[in-house]
Amino acid sequence: MPDELYREVLERIKPSAVEDAHMRSVAHEVIDKLDSEAREHGLDVYTIHVGSTARDTWLKGKKDIDIFLMFPPDTPLEKLKEDGLRLAREVSPRFEERYAEHPYITALYKGLDVDLVPCYHVEDAAHIQSAVDRSPFHNTYVLKHIDGLHDEVRLLKQFTRGVGVYGSELRTQGFSGYLCELLVLKYGSFDGAVEHGAGFKRGRVIDIEGHMDKSVEHPDPLIVIDPVDPKRNVAAALSGQKFCEFVDACRRFLKAPSIDFFFPPAAEPMKKGALEGLLASRGTKLLAITFKTPDIVEDTLYPQLRKAEDSLAKLLERHEFKAYRTDVWSNDRSAIVLEMLVWELPAIERHLGPPLDEREHCEKFIEKYPGAYIMGCRYVVDIPRKYDTAVELINAQLKSCGLGKHVCASIGQGFEILTNEKTLELGPEFARFLTKFLRAPET
């Protein structure tokens, strides 16, 4: 079964000869163009093709290429930026300037997005001057060791995509393509990676080159030491949640291999009637605090959204409300989403006073609260609850939560609390998100 299954998966994910030839042709043309421009401007710069398209581990349908402009290590940073962007702009009149650790250009060339990234050509990864300087070393290492395992990497990439744990960006916090490549190099095949993955425990260390710098602590669920940098954990972006989801998926796949692990059925948008029935059967309430999405990149947005999610959950807990599950979602509008177990409380709450042996404090407490009484050898008093619904509390105190700079500014301009079926007003993509968020049973 698995061999037939793998053949079927590869037929769907392996680029055709035509796709591959086009990708390589574009890469060569861009490199020739950039090298020629560098010579014309008298710059000591050369260009290389890196990433999965250079290593032949990319998946069908990929529309972007990574091209790095290699500058001498003694080039001043400002000159690298200036000359690098000037050269990159020559590739195509259709380009966009983007920012990571430093600026780069994404140019549209013959139907492909070409990322043109200036970096330093350093002696080894121990002397990098910016994070992108490692990429050429990653490229060299994988090309040297992959030894016919290209399709095994493709299988692992598609598997992690299918089970929802692919992508090291902060929105996903999952497995990078390079991490997938290293797991296949370590275990020799897709099967090997999955078999070992099923047995992973938090804190697992994988050190292919046996050169881990033990002076560096890695508090991550999975530690995969970069073969080109003994101080770096390639899996540092992987969250504990995605790590555990991967382990679970490996175990389930080994018990019952299926195409659905690679190509799961698309989540159906939650319908109004189904949502009403599900919440009624559970006895829970759905809240979505929505606001305009700040105009920032996702790797800046999502940490702020998660900070807001965590801060709001703690605010609710301090006031005796209880969320069953929480998450964040973003499109044109963003939302902090909560399924509430307790969203309404009695009109009174108990206010604790001092213990009886603190006589002076007790007298002041009784003077302030004549109706105080003894419970457990201390004074207590029943007082009106300031916020007896979660919605009232959020409306009053959301802006006082830890929100992150841009999310705080957006919420400051106005937010809305949608409840239950009203949350579907956020649109069909949010409705699909709800199906997964609520772990809705298949119909």
Image (tube, helix red, strand yellow):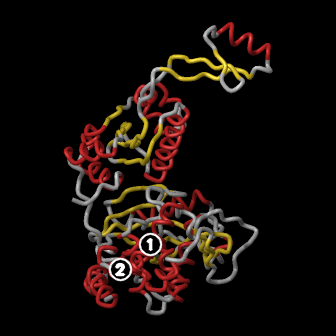
Q: Residues within 10 Å of mark 1 (few under 14, many from 20)?
A: many
Q: Does dot 2 land on a helix, a strand or a loop?
A: loop
Name the amino acid, label 1. Ile
Seen in the picture, residue 1 relative to 353 is either above or below; the reply is: below
Residue position marked by numbered label 1 in the rendering? 67
**Residue at position x 50%, y 71% from top?**
69
Q: Is residue 128 left or right of residue 15?
A: right
Question: Circle 2 sits on which residue?
Answer: 256
The residue drawn where x is 46% and y is 47% is 301
Task: Please indicate whether residue 191 sits to the left or right of residue 238 in the image.
Answer: left
Q: Position of residue 26 (x, y in %)?
A: 33, 77
Q: Position of residue 435 (x, y in %)?
A: 29, 54
Image quarter hosting the C terminus: bottom left
Question: Looking at this view, is 429 or 268 the one in front?
Answer: 268
Sequence-first disc among 1 and 2: 1
Q: Residue at x 70, y 80 (%)?
A: 211
Amino acid type for the residue under numbered disc 2: Ala
Compared to 430, does 158 lie above or below?
A: below
Image position of 196 with respect to 67: above or below: below
**Circle 1 or circle 2, nearest the eye:** 2
| Image coords of residue 407 (percent x, y) | 46, 39
The answer to which of 137 and 120 lies nearer the viewer is 137
Number of numbered discs present?
A: 2
Query: On the rendered image, what quadrant is the N terminus found in?
Result: bottom left
| Real-space Cα separation, disc 1 to disc 2, in angstroms | 41 Å
